[in-house]
Amino acid sequence: MLDALDSRLLTTMRANPRIGLTELARLLGVARGTVQARLDKLIARGVISDFGPTITTEQIGYPILAFASLQIAQGRLTEAVRWLADVPEILEVYGTSGQADLLCRVAARSTPHLQEIIARILASPAIQRTDTTIALSTQIPFRIEPLLQAAVTPPTP
């Protein structure tokens, strides 16, 4: 669970990713040591997973974003995941319920390049079928701030 200070701390850090601890403490109206202690606890709990920059794939030559749903041969999930880990254009892989076993977020240079990536994915005997959807636009970019606020608001009965 998060308390109000944790939520404000995380929201302020997201709004100002290069902010220093002293400035963060000033904006939150708490001591620098409090900010450091809170950050240490949030990191230890796995709430904060990294401090790296967010990379825009379009700006590094990969303007195509697609989602590939994969059906995996029975009992071969580990083999499939190992195969996918060797494909650099695969940004994320999630285990899912429903028709597909895995959902992959894929970046490609072009639609022919995407087709090559899908062919590479299907070259694994552990992967039986793919269903690919190309994202045309981002309607709501990744966001966490509304969830940070909801995490400290008690649920209504």
Image: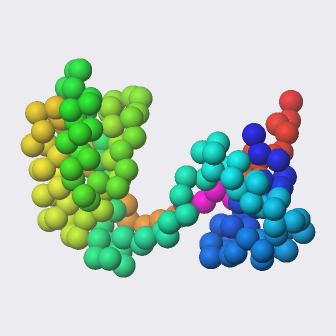
Q: Nearer the viewer, residue 39 or 84?
A: 39
Outermost residue on the top side: it is 75
* Location of residue 56 by image quarter: bottom left
Kindly tell me whether residue 114 is visible in this rendering.
Answer: yes
Residue 140 coordinates in the image, percent (x, y): 56, 62
Residue 64 coordinates in the image, percent (x, y): 30, 67
* Location of residue 81 by image quarter: top left
Residue 147 coordinates in the image, percent (x, y): 69, 50
How many marks the image carries: the answer is 0
For residue 41, side relative to residue 76 (left or right): right
Q: In the rendered view of the protein, which quadrant contains the C terminus?
A: top right
For residue 77, side relative to residue 135 (left or right): left
Kindly tell me whether residue 146 is visible in this rendering.
Answer: no
Name above or below for residue 110 compared with residue 99: below
Q: Residue at x 78, y 74 (%)?
A: 22
Q: Residue at x 69, y 53 (%)?
A: 40
Q: Magenta part of the protein: which range?
A: 142-147
